[in-house]
Image (cartoon, coloured by chain):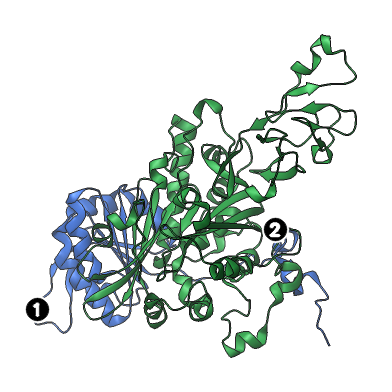
Amino acid sequence: MERRPTLLHSCALAATAAEARFRIDRPNSKTRDSRIVALDEEAAAILERIRREPWQGARFLTYQGPEDPAAEGPDAVLMTLEGTETRLSEELEGADVAIMVATTDRGAEGASIIGDACFLRRIMTAGLVVGDGAKIDQAITSLRPYASVLVVSSDEDYVPDMLVALRA
Amino acid sequence: MLRLEDNEFLTRTRPGTPMGDLFRQYWIPALLTEELPENDCPPVRVKLLSERLVALRDSSGRYGLIDEFCAHRGVSLWFGRNEEDGLRCPYHGWKYDVTGQCVEVPSEPEESGFCAKIKLTSYPLVEIGDVLWTHMGDPERRPPLPEWEFALVPPEQTFTSKRWQESNWLQALEGGIDSSHVSWLHSSGLQSDPLFKGARGNLYNLRDRRPFFEVVESDGGLFIGARREAEEGHYYWRITPWVMPSLTMIPPRGDHPVHGHFWVPIDDENCWVYSYDYHPTRPLTEEELAAMRSGHGIHCEYVSGTYRPLQNKDNDYLMDREAQKGGETYSGVKGIAMQDASLQESMGPVVDRTKENLVSTDNGIIMARRRLKKAALALRDNGETPPGVDPAHHRVRSASVVLPKEQSFIDASGEALSVVEGTGHSTV
C-alpha cells in the first residue's frame, strides 16, 4: 500500500515558511575551543586589534619559538596576548581547532610545529594568510602542508568575520 | 554562523535592498531563448528580483521585458494579444511596445497624444547563447554585455536548462561553492552518470573523501581549490571559480562537457537555477544532448510543460529508500541536480543561518558571503561598481589538474583558469 503523509510536517512540504517557524529554537551546539595563533608580528597585531570582541572561548596566542627539541613530540612556546607564556601542548588540550594566521613566511617554523602537533592529536587546522602580492607567496607555501583549509585574504577584516562564522 | 541582520542583508533582493541593488548591476538570465521561440509568440510571465514582469518577442523579432500589469486597470498582460509589434491588453485594447511605451489607447483620440504619457517599466532583453539576459538596474550604469564562455561558443557546443528551486538563492549558490559534499551526496553519480563517469579524476574523488581546501580571491569573486591525494608526490586539484554575484563553474571530468550554474533570485523564497553544459572545442554529441535532455548530469526531468522538477517537495522528491540502502544513490534521491535541490529546499525557504555550525572547510562559503556583503555596502555607500560586472571577470574557467605537491594551484594553473579561445579545459 502506498504510504502518504498525513500531516504537513511529515513530508517535504515541512520546508514551507509556515512550517519552518516550528524549528526548535534552542542551542544545537556547545562552545568550541578555538586556538588562534599568530605566526608573525603583523599577524599578532591583527589579533591584538580584535581580541576584545565578545568571543565564545577563543584563545589568542602568538608563536614564540620551538620548545626544547628533546621534548616528547612537537611542542612550542606560545604567548597569550596578555603576555603570559604557555606551551603549545597545553593549549591543544581539549582544543577543537587551531587557526594559524600569517602575513609573511617568517611563520614557517611555527606552522610546521603546530601542524604536526595538531595532526598527532587529530585536531583540525586552518591557515589564514593576510595580504597580497609576492610578499605572501612563501607564507602560503609554508602553511599549505599543515592546514586542512588555507585561506588567502587581502583584507584583515576577514579574520574576525571568519571567527564569528566559526563560532570561535 | 551568520548574525540575523547579516542573513537578512544577504538574502533579500527586492527593489531598494542592498543585495537587490547589487544584483541590478549585472546582466542576469531572465529566460531561455526557447521560451520565446518565434515572432508574435505567446508572452511569458517572468518574476525576477521580486518584480513581476512579462517577456515578449514582437512581430519584428525584438525582445522586451516589461511590467506585467497594464497601466489602465492593472490587468496582467500575460493575457495580452501579441500582434503588430506590440502587446495589446485584451480588456480595453491598450497596446505596448517592447520598451513598455504605450502606443495605442483606443478610447482616446489619437491626436490627443495621451498614449505617449503612458509607459511601463521595461528592461532590455538580449539573446546570447541559449539565454535571454536582462539588466534591471540604472540604464546610465548599464555594463557591457556578458562574455561567459558557455554562452559564446557556437550553438552546437552548448546546452542550457533551467529549473525552479523553492528556496532562497543564497543557500542554492552556497551549494555550488561547497565542493566537499560531492564525495558524499553525489558519490554514486560519479560512477554511473553518463555525463560524469569514466574520468580518472573520479577515482581520486572517491578514494579521498577528506579534501584539503584553499580559498583565494579573484578579480571577480573566488577560486576555491580542493585537493586530494593523487599519485605519490602529487595532488589532484579541482578548482571551482565563483564569479559575482552568482555564477559557479564546476571543474571538468575527462573529456565530458563542462558545466556550471547561474543562480537567479525569483523572489526571496524561490530562485531559478540555470544549468549549462558546453565544450569549448567540439560539438556536443547526440548521446550527450540526449542525456542532458533526459535529466542526467546537472539537469533534471520536469513536470510536463513546466520548468518545475518532476521530483519536488510535493512528492518527497520521489525518495527511494531501497536505492538509498542499497547504495544506488547516497541520499535516496535520483539525479545530481535534485540531490542538491532536495536538501537545499529542506532547509526552509530562507535558511536560518544563526543556527548553523560551520567548520573550517566551509571557508569558501564564509568568504563568498563576506565578498557579497562588502560589495553591496561599497555600492550603497560609495557607488562602487562591484566585482563580476566587468566582462573580463567572466573569462575564467574551472580546471582539474594533477600537480606536484609543492606547487600552488593558482600559480601552476594560471592559464588553465582563463578562457583561451579554441583550446580545451585543463582536465583529468
A155 is higher (above) or lower (below) than B363: above
Percent x, y of residue B330: 56, 81
- Looking at the rendered structure, the kind of residue marked 1 is Pro
Local crowd size for mark 1, using a 10 Å CA cut-off: few (<14), some (14–19), many (≥20): few
- Looking at the rendered structure, the kind of residue marked 2 is Tyr
Query: Which chain's colour is green?
Result: B
Q: Quadrant of the N terminus of chain A?
A: bottom right
Q: Residue at x 41, y 66 (%)?
A: B252
Q: Residue at x 44, y 34 (%)?
A: B385
B360 is higher (above) or lower (below) than A75: above
Percent x, y of residue A157: 35, 48
Local crowd size for mark 2, using a 10 Å CA cut-off: few (<14), some (14–19), many (≥20): some
Query: Which chain's colour is blue?
Result: A
Relative placement, left or right, of B330 versus B253 is right
The disc numbered 1 marks a residue on which chain? Answer: A
Foreground residue, B127 or B46? B127
Foreground residue, A59 or B314? B314
Relative placement, left or right, of B18 versus B223 is right
Residue under pointer 1: A69
Q: Secondary structure at mark 2?
A: loop
Q: Residue B56: give its label.
A: none
Residue under pointer 2: B307
Residue B326, visible in the rendered structure: yes
Q: Secondary structure at mark 1?
A: loop
Q: Residue at x 30, y 81 (%)?
A: A121
Relative placement, left or right, of A64 versus A145 is left
Percent x, y of residue B159: 55, 58
Q: Are marks 2 and 1 on the same chain?
A: no
In the image, which is nearer the foreground, mark 2 or mark 1?
A: 2
